[in-house]
Amino acid sequence: MAKTKLKIESREESKNPRQLRAAGNMPGSLYGKNMEAKSIQINTHEFEMAHRNNKDGEWELSLGKEKYNAKIQELQINYATNEYLNVEFTVI
């Protein structure tokens, strides 16, 4: 199974999730064994397009020069508006 590549950024702690979503980004987190959890933000449109083709597969996340192989642990969606609210990745 092919890995879906996605560029992520560190989340600015000064912005709350509503501000991120208004700017076209989605808040999220990245965590795993033997690593500190990271607060991230992802371009919502890029994530939606990638998620359509890879609902349960592996993801290759790029955070600067670091790369992580991860799976989606939890995805929060507002089903009334089909808006993606938050995503949690776990490193495998």
Image (spheres, rainbow, N blue to C red):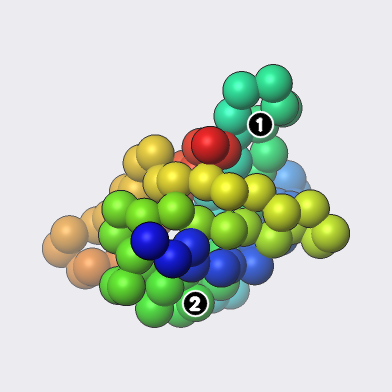
Is tag 2's residue or tag 1's residue first in the polypeptide sequence? 1
Nearest to the observer: residue 31 or residue 83: 31
Residue 68 percent coordinates (x, y): 65, 49
Quadrant for the N terminus in the image: bottom left
**Label 1 packing within 10 angstroms: few (<14), some (14-19), many (20+):** few
Residue at 58% across / 58% down in the picture? 60
Taking the view exactly as shown, the residue that stands out farthest to the front is 1
Nearest to the observer: residue 22 or residue 45: 45
**Label 2 packing within 10 angstroms: few (<14), some (14-19), many (20+):** few
39 in relation to 62, above or below: above
Residue 15 is left or right of residue 50, and the answer is right
Which residue corresponds to mark 2? 46
Amino acid type of disc 1? Ala
Residue at 25% across / 57% down in the picture? 78
Nearest to the observer: residue 70 or residue 81: 70
Q: Secondary structure under badge 2?
A: helix
Confirm or deny contact between disc 2 and disc 1 (CB under 8 A).
Answer: no
Residue 70 percent coordinates (x, y): 52, 46
Which residue corresponds to mark 1? 37
Q: From where the camera sits, is residue 18 visible?
A: no
For residue 61, which quarter of the picture?
Answer: bottom right
Residue 4 percent coordinates (x, y): 48, 67
Amino acid type of disc 2? Glu
Residue 46 is left or right of residue 42, and the answer is left
Residue at 36% across / 55% down in the picture? 57
Q: Secondary structure under badge 1?
A: loop
Residue 37 percent coordinates (x, y): 66, 31
Mark 2 → mark 1, Cα distance in angstroms: 22 Å
38 in relation to 75, above or below: above
Taking the view exactly as shown, the residue that stands out farthest to the top is 34
